[in-house]
Image (tube, rainbow, N blue to C red):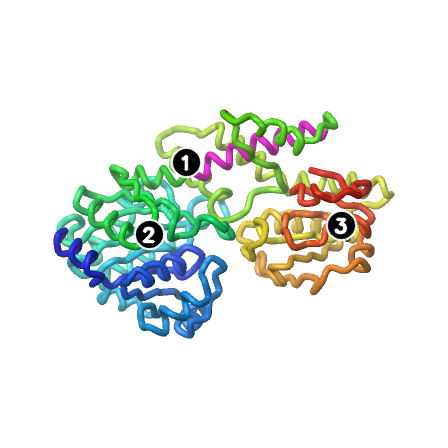
Amino acid sequence: MKQTLLTKIAKRELTVGVIGLGYVGLPLAVEKAKAGFKTIGFDVQKQKVDMVNAGENYIGDVVDSDLKNIVNSGMLSATSDFSFIKDVDFIAICVPTPLDRHQQPDVSYVQSSSTQIAKYLKKGSMVVLESTTYPGTTEELVKPILEEGSGLVCGVDFYLGFSPERVDPGNLIYKTKNTPKVVGAIGADALEVIAAMYRAVLDSDVFEASSPAVAEMEKILENTYRNVNIGLINELAILCNKMNINIWEVIDAAKSKPYGFQAFYPGPGLGGHCIPLDPYYLSWKAREYGFHTSMIEASMMINDRMPEYTVERAAKILNRFKKALNGANVLILGVAYKQDIDDYRESPALAVIENFIKSGTNIDFYDPYVKKYKHNGESFTGLESLTPEAVSSYDLVCVTTAHSNVDYDMVADNAIAVFDTKNAMKNVKNRSKIELL
């Protein structure tokens, strides 16, 4: 089986299946097709399937012309019918792994996808989980489902591995194609073949981990590392405010050191799919071993409180103008979770808005990339444009995303007061109305 698959990879005779056509799955499917592998994408959302089949792009990291060309050439198609699994040799699972309302891992999408795959899994296939999850998921959850549902034996009839997604929306340098990959698999043969498959597609290196659990923990480490360091800098930002010290200048001074320091920045909270969620996966799994991740949990507490702290600081600014939160008019600048993208998954701005609304504040938002968003079942629509008249009509402008295409000089000139939680206005010279986080 190993040699057959290696030969198919070399000759581009494999058919690839990608389950989940979101921020991870669609770029991966596009790169597989561009590398010469016929690729079939699956998604439960018919709108995404129809858009892919029409060559219409909806993901910022995918080049429009690339998608159109590979669809028109027949190298990429999409479906909502799980039976396509019987026609593919390599299956990548790229489904969401959110937290439930108890802040515990929700692997139901992984579980249901694995159950459906098992119904159609054929001998000589490779299955790779790419969704971020807790260590042990591949071997403890996915493997039994695939074996029981298909009647096949892992390592004998099919290969199974884990290769964590590494997607940074909006990154102008690193995309799916050139970002190094980590692969862990069950058995040496599986590792060799799955790693070969990724090497055939990517321009980057592939690190071969000794097991899926190592690869799963590696992904958690990447994002927990950032969570902990951001928690540290957020705590220092709160302290520096009490001490009347500019934390942003402190960081600039510290990063002048050419070794032993990496700059992290404070903000109104954490956003995106991975950094706010992954530490919860690890702390949940750690409790199975009677272990508490005290440092990680402390950073999570700090970061989770930042939206509330942001509103508390905003209240103090409004108080100087004899305004209460209740009844004040506040404009939120930016709801995307990071600059210059349209992704608002887990965006701290949404939590900031929620806290304002609970306090009776009248909230509007403007985001050049996000015109409307849904949160907790409600839809919100932003301002069509950012004008001097609009800015001057609010009691406070709160900058929660540092988009580069906003006229911050105009904002500073026309706002009554500005609370900049991202240091987005660092180059504005008129700073009389600006307060930094």
Give the mark, 2 or 3, whose residue is nearer the N terminus: 2
**Gap between marks 3 and 1, in whole Å?**
39 Å
Point out the residue furthest to the right here: 322
Q: Name the amino acid, label 1.
A: Leu
Residue for point 62% across, 53% down: 335
Q: Name the amino acid, label 3.
A: Asp
- Left or right: where does residue 265 sit relative to residue 82? right
Q: Quadrant of the N terminus?
A: bottom left
Residue for point 39% across, 41% down: 219
Q: Secondary structure at mark 3?
A: helix
Please give the residue where the numbered disc 2 appears in the rendered image. 202
Q: Residues within 10 Å of mark 2 (few under 14, many from 20)?
A: some
Q: Main secondary structure of the magenta part?
A: helix
Q: Secondary structure at mark 2?
A: loop
Q: Residues within 10 Å of mark 3 (few under 14, many from 20)?
A: some
Q: Which residues are magenta?
A: 221-241
Residue 328 appears in view: yes
* Most foreground residue, 115 or 79: 79
Labelled pair 2, 3 in contact (Cβ < 8 Å):
no
Residue for point 67% across, 27% down: 239
Looking at the rendered image, the disc whose residue lies closer to the viewer, 1 or 2, is: 2
* Most foreground residue, 263 or 101: 263
Q: Residues within 10 Å of mark 1 (few under 14, many from 20)?
A: some
**Gap between marks 1 and 2, in whole Å?**
23 Å
Q: Quadrant of the C terminus?
A: top right
Q: Name the amino acid, label 2.
A: Leu
Give the mark, 3 or 1, whose residue is nearer the N terminus: 1
Say the numbered circle drawn on residue 221: 1
Residue 427 to residue 364: above or below:
above
Please give the residue where the numbered disc 3 appears in the rendered image. 409
| Residue 399 screen position, x and y as percent | 69, 47
Residue 327 appears in view: no
